Amino acid sequence: MIKKLPFFVLVLFLLQIKFLYSQSNKTSTLIDNFEITMNETGLSKPQILQIKDLLIKKDQLLTENIELEKELNAKYPFVFHDQETTTKYINQQFVHSLSEIVTISQFKQLFLSQLNYRIKTIAEDKFNLSKKRYKFTVDQEAKLKKLLQETTTNEIIIKEYYSYDDNLSWNNYTEEKIKSSDKERELLKSFGLFYSKNTKTDNLIKKLIEAQVDAERINQILLALQILQERNDKRLKTWRENDVANAFNFHDPGDDEYAIYLDFREQLSKILKIEEFKTVFVSQMQNRIVRDTQKEFQILKSAYKLTDAQYDEIQKLVLEKNTEKIVTEEYYKYSYELYQQKLRAVEYRHEKNIRETIQKMMNVTMEIKK
């Protein structure tokens, strides 16, 4: 058995050499084939040489990574080396170096063919989602398909070009998606349709139509919503960039999520009249309206002895008061001073009416007793 061991080891060694040689040949063939693509793309000779060197180095590192994994697994019962993470890091470093050699346009020419299936699948999913929401003519379908193919291509190319840095990739990908949404919104607008990508916006559009808000103002609101999203995305991007670049990230209150939201609310109030605002959004305020009404009514009920019919009438008045009060507060939410001023007027008018009504009821009761 001992005499056979050297021969066995020799066989393993030869097999390993054969494997590495075959892998080397395969890599060499792939690089040669890719060189043809690089030439067809119009890359310069220095660019091609740099990329070939990068590819060779990447494959060497990946091979070393595999070998290291094997060695560690043979040596230790538990291995901390993470081949998957290391492979990801090697590939990210390759893409990073590649992005310093080629432009995003050249990157697209080089790698679009292998990304086409993913792009096609995502674009088709987007189209099918839109088709569920809208009724298109044949011509409109063709135009939308073309646009979605173009915008999805740009999104995926940008995402992969910057894939060496998760934050950078996300930021640029998000910016490109915003551009895509703008183009899609404009196309749908040209079809006479409202742009919506989720059921929340669908419901909003439905309520706006029910409130008889005209198409122009509906589109203004949808655009304001889009700007709200864009500003929040930009805020997150800026925050990430500052967090990476600085030891201390000073918060900008003017760029806070709530400040951005209040700007949107101001736009909304300028587009909608308060009665339209009430029609569209009052259902979202019902819990608060009912809660405040019950609380206030119980206080009045404890203070005055009235008939059941009179209590019902007072409760209706209190409900009207709280409905207008809360709608007014939400309508002018963007300005504390303004909504406080408006609230005082609303409260004074309703409370005066409630007091006078109660007084009349009590006077009637006293007259009856006489």
Image (tube, rainbow, N blue to C red):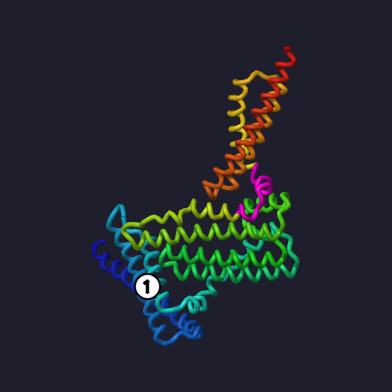
Residue 83 on image: x %, y %:
36, 61
Residue 73 visible from this viewpoint = no
Residue 131 on image: x %, y %:
69, 60
**Closer-to-camera residue (75/226):** 226
Q: Residues within 10 Å of mark 1 (few under 14, many from 20)?
A: some
Which residue does the image show at 71% across and 54% down from the upper left? 213
Q: Is residue 32 left or right of residue 116?
A: left
**Magenta stretch: includes residue 101:** no
Q: Where are the magenta residues, as a range?
A: 268-282
- Residue 263 position (above or below residue 121): above
- Residue 201 position (above or below residue 86): above
Residue 6 on image: x %, y %:
26, 67
**Closer-to-camera residue (89/218):** 218
Q: Is residue 262 left or right of residue 166?
A: right
Which residue does the image show at 60% across and 47% down from the upper left? 331
**Closer-to-camera residue (208/177):** 208
Q: Hey, what amino acid is under mark 1? A: Lys
Residue 243 on image: x %, y %:
37, 59
Q: Is residue 278 left or right of residue 35?
A: right
Q: Is residue 330 left or right of residue 64?
A: right
- Residue 167 position (above or below residue 325): below
Residue placed under numbered mark 1 in the picture: 58
